[in-house]
Amino acid sequence: MKPTIYDVAQAAGVSIATVSKVINATGRISDKTRKHVHSVMEQLKYQPSMVAAALTGKSTYTIGLTLPDLANPFFAEIARSVEDRGHEHGFNVFICNTDNDPDKEVKYLSLLSQKRVDGIISATRIQNDQFLKKLIQQNIPIALITGEMPTLAVDTVMVDDYLGGFQAGNHLLELGHKRIAILVEDMDNMSNRERLRGCKQALSHVGLHVEERLVAIGGFSVETGQQAMAQLLQLEDKPSAVFACNDLLAIGAIRAARVAGMQLPSELSVVGFDNTILATLIDPPLTTIAQPIQEIGRRAVDLLVEEIKGEKVLKQRVVLLPELVIRNSCTSYNKQ
C-alpha cells in the first residue's frame, strides 16, 4: 500500500492539516516542523497526489511544454532552459514532442489539460487556434515561444526574426557576396517568413533582388536541407553564399557542398540561425545568428508562473535581440 497523508501525519506526530500546509506551502508553519514533515515524507516515500490536488482546485505545480522536434538541438536546449527555470520556481515540467504533427500536437495539449497542469508553454506552430481558445477559456495560462499568434491573448517570448535575417544578409553583403541563396523550413512558419524578409530587405538596401529560384524550402532536418541545397548547386550560375534559417539546414548546405566537391568557405559561404551546439562542432565552425535560448526559456517560465500565481493580468509580448556570431564558414567573395 502506498503511504497516505494520514500515515505521514501519524509518523510525524502532527495533524493532517499541518501536513497539508507543508505540502501546499501555505499557512504559518515553523521551519523546524516543515523540515521534520519533509523528512518523514522522504522516509515513507510519500508522493502527494497531483490528481487530488487538481480536483480540489489546488496547484499541481506542473507545467506542460510542447516542442516540435527534440532531435533539433535548439529545442533540446529550450527544453533544458524551461525545465531548469521551472524547477527553480518549484514546478515540474512535462515535455511533449509533437514531431511537427498538428494532430499529435492537439492530442498532447488535450492530455495536458486532462492532467490539470497549471500552465502550458508551446514552442510548436499551433495550427488549431480554436483548440487553443478552448484552453484559454478553461483558464489555463499559456505562453508561446519562438512564434506568436496575434489573434490570441497569450504571453509570447520570441526573438526578432526579421532583424536576425537582416544581420545574416548584411554580413554576406559586407563580404562582397551578391548571389545569395536562402534556405527556409517552410513558408507557413511566421519566424521563417520574417527571417526571409529580413535577409531580402538587407539585399534590397543595396539594390539587389533575390531571385525566387534561389529561395528553397529545406524542411526540418539536415537531410532535407542537404537535398534542397544540392538542387541550388545544380544551377548554372551557382550562389556564392547561402543563408539557412536554422543551423540544421546550414549543416545540410555544408554537406551538399562537400558532396559536390566544393571547398568551404572559399567556394560557398554559409550562415545559419540559432547558434546551437552543432554550430561549433561542424567543420568549418558555423557563422550563425544566435538566439538567446536560455533567456527565452527563463522569460517564458517567469511569465507563466506570474499568471499562475495571479501576480499579473496583462499579457506580454517579449521580443529579444539576436546576435551575429562570426566563425569560419564565411569568407570574402573573390570571383575566379
Image (cartoon, grey):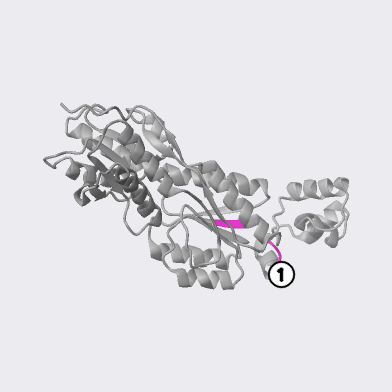
Q: Is residue 62 magenta?
A: yes
How far from the left and from the top, in percent, is residue 301? 60, 52
Query: Label 1's element?
Result: loop
Q: Is residue 125 left or right of residue 180?
A: right
Quarter of the image for residue 313 reads bottom right
How far from the left and from the top, in percent, is residue 73? 43, 42
How far from the left and from the top, in percent, is residue 20? 79, 60
Please determine whether, in this image, residue 79 is positioned above or below residue 48: above
> What residue lies at 36% left-to-right and 32% top-to-bottom?
286
Q: What residue range appears in magenta?
A: 58-64
Quarter of the image for residue 115 reads bottom right
> What residue lies at 80% left-to-right and 61% top-to-bottom?
6
The 10 Å Cα crowd at callout 1, few under 14, some 14 to 19, many 20 or more, is: few
Q: Is residue 2 magenta?
A: no
Q: Is residue 249 left or right of residue 308?
A: left
Q: Is residue 70 visible?
A: no
How far from the left and from the top, in percent, is residue 2? 69, 58
Residue picked out by circle 1: 56
> What residue lies at 63% left-to-right and 61% top-to-bottom?
118
Please determine whether, in this image, residue 233 is positioned above or below residue 21: above
Q: Is residue 242 visible?
A: yes
Q: Quadrant of the N terminus?
A: bottom right
